[in-house]
Amino acid sequence: MARPNILLFLTDDHGQWANGCYGNSELQTPNLDRLATEGARFADAFT
């Protein structure tokens, strides 16, 4: 079994509202949207 590729993306003071993949149509975040679509999102994570 191949080892999975893992990308942990953490930002400071960056809410869900700042991403198109969570329904924001005013901001364009195509790369983040693609990562969210092809990977796993943890919508209720708390750091």
Image (cartoon, helix red, strand yellow):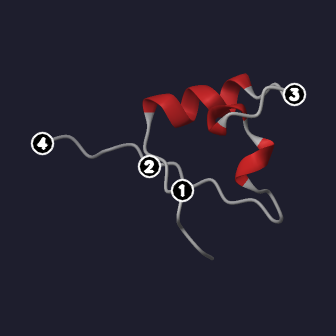
Classed neighbour count for the residue bearing mark 3: other residues with Cα under 10 Å, few (<14), some (14–19), many (≥20): few
- Report which residue position mark 2 lands on: 6
Mark 4 or 3: in front is: 3
- Residue behind mark 1: 43
SS class, disc 2: loop
Residue type marked 3: Glu
* Three-letter amino acid code of the residue under disc 1: Ala
> Mark 1 or 4 closer to N-term?
4
Q: Residue at x 44, y 49 (%)?
A: 6
Q: Is residue 13 left or right of residue 2?
A: right
Residue corresponding to mark 4:
1
Measured as percent of width and height from the top left, residue 13 is found at: 83, 64
Q: Which-is-in-front pick, marks 2 and 4? A: 2
- CA distance separating discs 2 and 1: 17 Å
Dot 2 or dot 1: first in sequence order is 2
Q: Earlier in the sequence, mark 4 or mark 3?
A: 4
* Residue drawn at point x = 53 percent, y = 64 percent: 44
Label 3 SS: loop
Marks 2,1: beta carbons within 8 A: no
Q: Quadrant of the N terminus?
A: top left
Disc 3: which residue: 26
Q: Is residue 11 left or right of residue 3?
A: right
Amino acid type shown at disc 2: Ile
Taking 39 as reference, is 15 above or below it? Answer: below
Q: Quadrant of residue 11?
A: bottom right
Residue drawn at 49 percent across, 29 percent down: 37
- Percent of width and height locating residue 9: 63, 53
Q: Position of residue 29 (x, y in %)?
A: 76, 29
In the displayed structure, 42 sits above or below 40; it is below
Name the spot of residue 24 as percent of width and height, x first: 76, 34
Upstream in the sequence, badge 2 or badge 3? 2
